Image (cartoon, coloured by chain):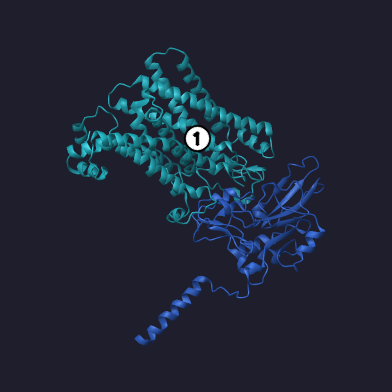
Chain colours: A cyan, B blue
Amino acid sequence: MNGVVGYMYPNEVTLYWSVLIVLYPFITGLVAGAFILASLERVFRVEAVKPTYRLALLTALAFLLDAPLPLQLHLGHPERSPEMYFTPHSTSAMAMFGYVYLWYLMAVLVFEIWLDYRRDIVLWSQESKGLLRVIYKIMSLGSSNISERSLHIDERVGWVVTLVGIPSAFLLHGYVGFIFGSLKANPWWSSPLMPVVFIFSAMVSGIAAVMLIYMAVTKLRRQSIDMRCIDTVAMYMFYIFIIDFSLEMLDLVHRIYEADESFRSLDFMVHTKLFFSQIVVQIIIGTLVPLVLLFITQVARIREVIRKRIYVLCGCLILISVFAMRWNVVIGGQLFSKSFLGYTTYKMDLVTREGLFVAIGLTILPLVFLSVLLKLLPPWPEKTLHEVAAGD
Amino acid sequence: MNISRRHLLVLLPAAAVAWKHVLAGTPQDSPNYQMSEHWWGMLIDIPKCIGCGNCVRACQTENDVPDGFFRTWVERYHRSDIHLENPEVISPDGGKEGFPPVPEGAEGDYFFVPKMCNHCSDSPCTQVCPVGATFISPDGVVLIDQKYCLGCAYCVQACPYGCRYIHPTKKVADKCTLCYHRITKGLTTACCEACPTGARQLADLKNPNDPIHAFLKTHSVQVLKPQMATGAKAFYNGLDGSVR
């Protein structure tokens, strides 16, 4: 049979979870990671990362708005997806998605952004004109009190929301890992470490994404990059990446040492079908190279210009690595037979509903959302109200 | 033909009722069937299977199974003495048209293993379905409400036996229903009926007179992948340890 080596159960030849299901954990990971970065400033009082605080929240929102789209496009009957809200099956991990998503979107992210921007929204609604004024009026939800006491309440409530948001971010992405890790039928997925690995890789990718977006946006605005800020961001990224890599290696070493009945089949897959995406891209290029580079920035004195370039390179490599990790989990988990006797091949379509072009579109879409959010809710403090009103 | 308004008013509801039956395939009633009196399973007698593929063809005809997908299939195992753990397995087109002849003088054992949904009593596919479209009927058959299924394929991933697929045109999960439309009318499944050697036998575990009970007492019967603890109800006689 085409693309099949050895023996696959006949219904296994086709892969049922495509590149869109690779995108879904990648995007939700960016959301969780961006939020954790924001919480560094808000809850843990890491003042150095303050320039990224609002940007991180908006980035998280932009990606969260995009997150359900790959799932919807993947479903055979997307029109039935509201049933997950109305008649959820209590024993299904996937059934909780709708609730976790809504909780995170509405109760955590949107609420926190609203609280943080409320003063500005009220001021903008007073100073801007035309359609913008209407939009800001609606966004203020009729709350126009910006007295000191009221802003103090906003601050306290916002702190609590962020505090609640940290476990929520863990829940959002840990739950995505649980969807895979809880399937006993698939030894490539079935691991209690899976949710933990997903959480830490999410944090690394989200921090990398916000750092890159911060550097790009600052450059576009012809402002100078706050080196103290990105040095601190890079430091956190480095430490969390070490934890992430250690957990992944623990999982790998455990599998190799235990060598259960699936090991020979999975080992062969890693050395053949997944060799490029896992060994070369994920581990060597995407993990070891940035870890070494980030380590050098931590221990050696390097000129600012070079440091910036290293951070950009590491950020890009980390995003590629985490995407490759999602790919290796989702696609890799379907390439081998549950009989452990054969392998199939994933042939990605180009222009179909679950094809490459749609995947690229869904990857770019959050950046479009983010650019709209940045126009509406500029996160930089030096932005004058006049500039906002002028739509700059 | 002239139809008066009065005639039209009488004919229209009658036509609507008739059309509804045409669309529904005019199912027969099974008024005497009590779900609580049955607990269905399947007995598969491996030494009796000759790999003719009759069961696969009968299933595909009975259930309109799409090409390239299988509610049941037959595998041929070749287990040589030095590769006990790594048998050579083939199932060309699900064994629908039988198998190529065994080479003359070939060493080791050759045997056939029919596969199908195990109608597990603790089925992982039922557990993971986000909307409960997959369910276990009170008589022990794992079924799918295809008007409710989202087509997310989570159940396909959760099945350890590879028995599920996404129907290419209906875009919903599909699998063996144990010919539920037949067994509730006192018939056996299409695969059992078509098997020339009796290698497959429908079993009602709640019926004390069912021959399954005597068979289970006198034979060494196993289920596939017992380590999965799914409560599988496809019972295999003569199951070799190399079968996955």
Tell me residue A67's x, y (percent).
42, 43
Read off the residue under disc 1. Answer: A199
Residue sitting at x 58%, y 43%:
A182
Tell me where residue B233 sits by quadrant: bottom right
Q: Going by the image, does A290 lie left or right of B200?
A: left
Residue B101 in sight here: no
Tell me residue B228's x, y (percent).
67, 47
Q: Is residue B48 above or below residue A177?
A: below
* Amino acid at the residue labelled 1: Ile
Circle 1: element type: helix
Instruction: Report crowding for label 1: few under 14, some 14 to 19, many 20 or more residues within 10 A (C-alpha).
Output: many
User: Which residue is situated farthest in the front direction here?
Assistant: A149
Q: Going by the image, does A231 lie left or right of B90?
A: left
Q: Is residue A87 above or below residue A151?
A: below
Residue sitting at x 25%, y 38%:
A121
Tell me residue A46's x, y (percent).
39, 25
Q: Nearer the viewer, residue A232 or A146?
A: A146
User: Which residue is situated farthest in the top direction here?
Assistant: A301
Q: How many marks?
A: 1
Q: Going by the image, does A227 lie left or right of B167?
A: left
Residue A131 in sight here: yes
Q: Is residue B211 above or below residue B93?
A: below
| Letter of the chain that mark 1 sits on in the rendering | A
Q: Nearer the viewer, residue A256 or A103?
A: A103
Tell me residue B230's x, y (percent).
65, 51
Q: Quadrant of the C terminus of chain A?
A: top left
Q: Nearer the viewer, residue B103 or B125?
A: B125
Tell me where residue B210 sits by quadrant: bottom right
